Image (cartoon, rainbow, N blue to C red):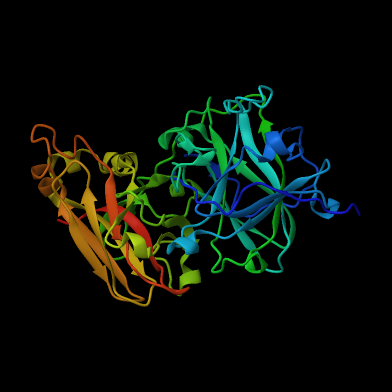
Amino acid sequence: MRKEIRRSISLLCTAAAFTVLAVSCGGQPTETSEKPSITIMNGFEHFDRDVQQIRVFNRFGRLEVNMDEKYVRSGNSSLHVQPFGGRIAASTSNPYFVIPTTSVRFQEYAYNNFKDVETLCFWAYNAEAEPLNVGVSFQAGDIGVVGGRPSADNVQRTAVEYYSLKSGWNYVEYEIRSAYLAMHGVTVENVKGIALEFDYVWSNDFADAPDVYIDDVSLRYAEKKKMDAVAFDGEKKTSDTGVESWSVCDFEKPSQNWYFWTRMAVTPPAAQPVVKQVFAGDYGTLAQEGGQALLIGAKHGGKQKGAYIGVFLYADALKAAMAAVGEDLKNNPQNYAFKFDAYNASEVTTGFSVAFVGTATGANFTIEPHTWKTYTSLNFAELNARSDDVNNPYTQNVGDVRFAFSDYSASGNYADRPVLIDNVRIEKIA
């Protein structure tokens, strides 16, 4: 075995970031070694071209070139990853790095056109005994750079799709869906970068940081790229008691993770929340519909106490359910309301507010620990009456739905406040 050679890029640095679209192939990596012909975008073979251009965020930790063949999938080297995260900054934001798809200096490094890309693929070696999470997303905004370093703690990204890496080698595939990318502001002909996110580590000692090796970040091109469309729900359901509702999302489909996007309401930003689909049973409860729910993991950040974290439901998802209701909602908006169920999985009473963008609304919603509670909005006639434009009521000009969580000062591994949301729907109330 060759002696391991390490060259570190400047890592323990303060970075910056923010949220695109596609749908994964399932949430679990595959183990297949034989794959159809693909193009290796980055095999981490050249330090200046393949590694030095990587940008790190949320006080990432360390990236190094690895040449120990045990952790190399092909070629002579791979990328050694040791994530920390934002704990050093009194925040628990997940660390991530962005691999650019183009280079001004290296003209041959040009992989930004994803028009015919079917899947993004890479190999990951988890050197730990326990499974580790890796999140895949895409850069959706420009990275401001000062003196060679990012000028903020976040860059705008798409929704994050999470995978569990077992101990040893994992092959991760991520299906590219151009319609979903476009929802998050990413042009499929010009994808700026690929982001890989890891769980934060409650330590600043490298002895406590996990060891992960990434190799052969690749693009698989299709002969004919399928035309995909955003698949919103809108299915009508009738409860055992005869209550009619139309589903906005029940979180049983992987694509529904893309219905939400995040925005920090202050500068510097509050800690980026985790927003992902999870099995409700992992949080000690049953889902209200199916087996899965949406986790909104509100983080704490002592330096930004009082700031607000915005998690938004895309208006198009709500519009699809409204269209499924049909003419009766338009003619009798007073008979319908927006509803969802929320579960407080933390140990303290948790509150957030719900507002409909484009109207003068905003209602506080508080849930006791380990309790499900149903949120019911004003009926659609009242939302129309509160529209910012009286000549363009909400049912004709549907806006995003905003869930706002207050940032808060706290400490300890269990200080974050996870909330599950499920069974988002339009319900007939009269």
In which quadrant will I find the C terminus? Answer: bottom left
Q: Is residue 82 visible to us here?
A: yes
Which image quadrant for residue 377?
bottom left
Whether residue 218 is visible to the viewer of this picture, yes or no, is no
Quadrant containing the N terminus in the rendered view? bottom right
Q: Is residue 216 left or right of residue 69?
A: left
The vertical placement of 231 against 66, above or below, is above
The percent position of residue 311, horizontal first and vertical second, equals: 34, 51
- Towards the viewer: 169 or 42: 42
The residue lying toward the viewer, choosing from 88 and 194, is 88
Q: Is residue 44 left or right of residue 82?
A: right
Instruction: Give percent across and percent down for residue 85.
Output: 53, 59
Tally of numbered discs: 0
**Towards the viewer: 354 or 426:** 354
In the rendered image, the residue lying farthest to the right is 1
Residue pictured at 77% horizontal, 40% vertical = 35
Q: Is residue 318 above or below residue 306?
A: above
Q: Residue 13 at x, y = what percent?
A: 54, 51
| Residue sticking out furthest to the front | 147
Say which residue appears at 48% left-offset and 73% top-offset.
413
When the figure is inspected, residue 286 is found, relative to residue 353, above or below; the finding is below
- State the residue in front, 190 or 338: 190
Relative horizontal placement of residue 3, taking residue 143 as reference (left or right): right
Farthest residue toward the top? 107
